[in-house]
Amino acid sequence: MKQSLDNIVEVSDLHFSYGKRQILKGINLNIPRGKVVAILGVSGCGKSTLLHHFGGQLKPDSGSVKILGKIIHSLNTDELYAMRREMGMMFQVSGLFTDLSVYDNLAFPMREHTDMSEEMIRDLVLMKLQAVGLRNAYGLMPKDLSGGMERRVALARAIALDPALIIYDEPFAGLDPISLNIIANLIRKLNDALGVSSVVVTYDMSESLKIADYVYFIHEGVVVAEGDAADMIASEDPFVHQFIHAEPDGPVAFQYPARPYTEDLM
């Protein structure tokens, strides 16, 4: 996927290490405007570290992350906060404020970042909840929500400020099949209805391939395969084939790298 003005995110030769442990080893990827892009990979491959660079929590050792034409790690604090307003984030564990109602969870970013009246905030909160099918749940507390409902509230909060980019960190983890399908369909429908760009970071193959326009596979800190979802399903690339079909043998080893087992027993 070539870089162009139509890309809302451009990651170029991104390297990052935690001490001596190298996590990202030259990531290159683009997120086009108006598309759903899935970033897939096994646990520990660098997906979450990549997301931390999107939000500016981490700075690269080399390379760059450019969002809306601006290099994230070169922004000052005020510029970074302004950029983050253009991003919506659905956290892996939902990240709702446990002491606030559903209504106040959605109203919080509106009150924090805008000068809208409470009347306008009310209308917008109910509008966002209506979009995820939970308008009448506005008075509930997070502890009163099922896992699927909690994810939908988190999704509604992610779109509260009408961001240009929505990031979903493992949105399907721990959900039952019905809730999982609901969340997946909402991601696709909201992306198209709002005209935003969406990044779905996950290890769930079946649902992500159903809703994604383009797919990147990350393994050991690099992009090992990319393409349209249909092409990835038919791919003969060893890593992609192993990942899609959940095969135990392939490029992804079961054992953590170590010296021969017999040497440890001697």
Image (cartoon, helix red, strand yellow):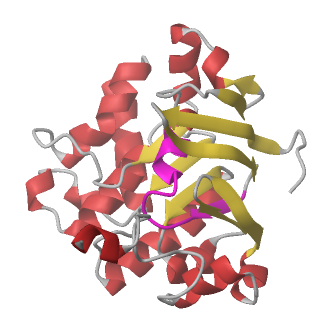
Residue drawn at (76%, 88%), measured in percent from left and top? 236
Check the image and report above or below for 250 versus 125.
below
Check the image and report above or below for 121 versus 154.
above
Q: Say left or right for 44 vs 10.
A: left
Residue drawn at (58%, 83%), measured in percent from left and top? 250
Q: Which residues are magenta?
A: 35-52
Report if residue 119 is visible in the image. Answer: no
Residues 99 and 126: in front is 99
Tally of marks: 0
Residue 171: x %, y % from top left: 41, 63
Residues 113 and 249: in front is 249
Residues 202 and 20: in front is 20
Q: Is residue 41 magenta?
A: yes
Q: Residue furthest front?
A: 266
Residue 134: x %, y % from top left: 30, 62
Q: Say left or right for 184 vs 79.
A: left
Q: Quadrant of residue 95?
A: top left
Check the image and report above or below for 255 versus 110.
below
Residue drawn at (61%, 59%), measured in percent from left and top? 191
Report if residue 7 is visible in the image. Answer: yes
Residue 166: x %, y % from top left: 55, 48
Residue drawn at (46%, 28%), measured in percent from left and top? 57
Residues 124 and 15: in front is 15
Q: Quadrant of the C terminus?
A: bottom left
Q: Is residue 16 magenta?
A: no
Residue 99: x %, y % from top left: 10, 39
Q: Quadrant of the N terminus?
A: bottom right
